[in-house]
């Protein structure tokens, strides 16, 4: 039996572990730096059908119906014209079993955590050193304990320290010149929008998304605001918890997003958006990187978690088939989704009235053009 150590108990690490548990050739353990998995309430998550299909292989469809939502459309609104631009039918990519799903992030994490016996998740294990001179890899933790494994899977998120350790250099994501604000809001406080769909509001240097996270009328709000920050501001993480900074950011957003929305937000959090600039491939053939540690996407195609799940599933298939490495297709797909996410960001944030007019006209035409939709969206959703 081969020993597999997974570093990080987020979406990708937990999903990877639950897949490996299906194969009796592998003995899997997770090592998480915190003292529990992150079940913080308040964050929503969108899962497109490409990842729902893979999650259903481990029973995701059995999550209580009340705790998830199946939006059929994305409605695009112009914040400048205060009107709907067009809608995109995302249900066109659904099958009877696999449907585009929105839910609370903790519902997904709790589901994944419950797939794994608690003795296989080791908490308070922060990696500080990795030694892999032979077939066996040794991992040393901050508490001075260590383990040996045949395979090391790194899934410790966008700021992966373990990735830097094996690369022998610091690999950092870069600031995407944007900050994100998220909060919760009730259906009763959302007027003039279709409550069964995802609403995407396009503004000037800003876009925001509102979507239901369960069947009880609770919605997730997220706004992405273009903002330059200097290195001191970025290094000072407490800035994002500073009441004055959060209030001024909300004020900035309320100039475009309806005040009825901004004033009714609860559990507001503000954070900088970081993205990957390169794909790092480990030299050691028994070490793999998945999830945000593999690649952190801009949040404008809502593909972060979905890709984390896809990559983990692909790695599991490689384990089953005895393949050593991710294939070139994965890198090509990652670059394609990154390009499209960046293009979305560019188009969502226009401020020039002529550009906005042309964009809206083109969007109305393109969302009804099957060839375009199958290529632009379908290539991601129909993996
Ligand atoms: C604004 C925003 C909106 C988003 N919306 C969506 C969306 O709608 N849909 C979507 O698909 N994705 C979305 N994402 C992205 C998605 O949240 C991530 O892609 C996903 O959570 C990545 O999972 P992960 O397991 O790779 O990393 P993480 O969830 O970050 O988990 C990493 C884990 O590793 C642990 N860890 C860290 N360092 C160490 C260490 N040294 N040793 C041991 N453990 C360690 C951490 O404590 C953590 O538990 C969004 C992201 C942002 C920023």
Image (tube, rainbow, N blue to C red):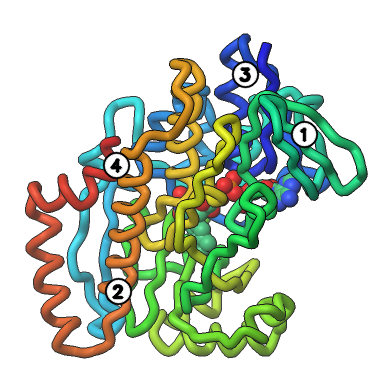
The one nearer the camera, 202 or 344, is: 344
Q: Which label's residue is closer to the chain start, 2 or 1?
A: 1
Name the disc covering residue 381, or none: 4
Q: Secondary structure at mark 2?
A: helix
What is the crowding at mark 1: few (fewer than 14 residues within 10 Å), some, or many (at least 20)?
some
Residue 32: quadrant of the picture: top right
The image shows residue 364, relative to residue 286, as above or below, that is below
Name the disc covering residue 138, or none: 1
Left or right? Give the position of 106 relative to 278: right
Residue 39 in view in this figure: no
What is the crowding at mark 4: few (fewer than 14 residues within 10 Å), some, or many (at least 20)?
many
Q: Ligand 1: does it lie within 8 Å of the C-beta at label 3?
A: no
Q: Which label's residue is closer to the chain start, 3 or 4?
A: 3
All told, the count of numbered labels is 4
- Distance between the alpha carbons at the discs numbered 4 and 1: 38 Å
Can you name the residue that lies furthest to the right here? 144
Q: Which label's residue is closer to the chain start, 3 or 2?
A: 3
Q: Which label's residue is closer to the chain start, 1 or 3?
A: 3
Left or right? Give the position of 244 relative to 331: right
- Distance between the alpha carbons at the discs numbered 3 and 2: 41 Å
Q: Nearer the viewer, mark 4 or mark 1?
A: 1
Position in image of residue 236 (x %, y %): 71, 80
Q: Nearer the viewer, mark 3 or mark 4?
A: 3
- Distance between the alpha carbons at the discs numbered 2 and 4: 21 Å
Is the residue under label 1 in contact with that under label 2 (CB below 8 Å)? no
- Distance between the alpha carbons at the discs numbered 3 and 4: 26 Å
Q: Secondary structure at mark 3?
A: loop
Q: Secondary structure at mark 4?
A: helix
């Amino acid at each position: 039996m081969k020993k597999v150590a997974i570093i990080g108990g987020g979406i990708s690490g937990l999903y990877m572990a639950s897949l490996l548990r299906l194969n009796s050739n592998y003995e899997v353990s997770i090592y998480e730096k915190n003292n529990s998995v992150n079940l913080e309430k308040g964050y929503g998550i969108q899962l497109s059908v490409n990842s729902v299909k893979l999650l259903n292989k481990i029973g995701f469809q059995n999550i209580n119906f009340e705790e998830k939502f199946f939006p059929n459309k994305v409605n695009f609104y112009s914040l400048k014209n205060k009107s709907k631009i067009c809608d995109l039918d995302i249900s066109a990519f659904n099958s009877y079993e696999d449907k585009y799903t929105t839910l609370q992030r903790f519902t997904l994490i709790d589901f994944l955590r419950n797939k794994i016996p608690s003795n296989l998740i080791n908490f308070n294990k922060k990696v500080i050193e990795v030694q892999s001179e032979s077939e066996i890899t040794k991992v040393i933790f901050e508490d001075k304990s260590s383990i040996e494994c045949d395979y090391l899977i790194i899934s410790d998120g966008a700021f992966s320290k373990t990735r830097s350790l094996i690369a022998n250099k610091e690999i950092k994501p870069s600031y995407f010149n944007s900050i994100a604000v998220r909060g919760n809001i009730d259906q009763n406080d959302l007027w003039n929008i279709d409550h069964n769909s995802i609403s995407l509001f396009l503004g000037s240097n800003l876009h925001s998304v509102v979507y239901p996270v369960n069947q009880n009328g609770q919605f997730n709000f997220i706004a992405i605001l273009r903002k330059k920050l200097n290195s001191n501001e970025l290094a000072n993480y407490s800035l994002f918890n500073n009441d004055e900074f959060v209030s001024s950011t909300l004020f900035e957003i309320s100039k475009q997003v309806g005040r009825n929305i901004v004033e009714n937000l609860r559990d507001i959090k503000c954070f900088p958006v970081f993205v990957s600039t390169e794909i790092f491939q480990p030299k050691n053939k028994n070490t793999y990187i998945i999830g945000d540690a593999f690649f952190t996407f801009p949040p404008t195609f809502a593909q972060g978690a979905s890709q984390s799940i896809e990559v983990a599933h692909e790695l599991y298939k490689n384990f089953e088939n005895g393949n050593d490495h991710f294939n070139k297709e994965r890198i090509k797909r990652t670059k394609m989704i990154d390009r499209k996410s960046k293009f979305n960001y560019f188009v969502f944030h226009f401020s020039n009235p002529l550009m906005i007019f042309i964009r809206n006209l083109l969007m109305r035409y393109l969302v009804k053009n099957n060839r375009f939709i199958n290529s632009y969206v379908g290539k991601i959703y129909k993996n």
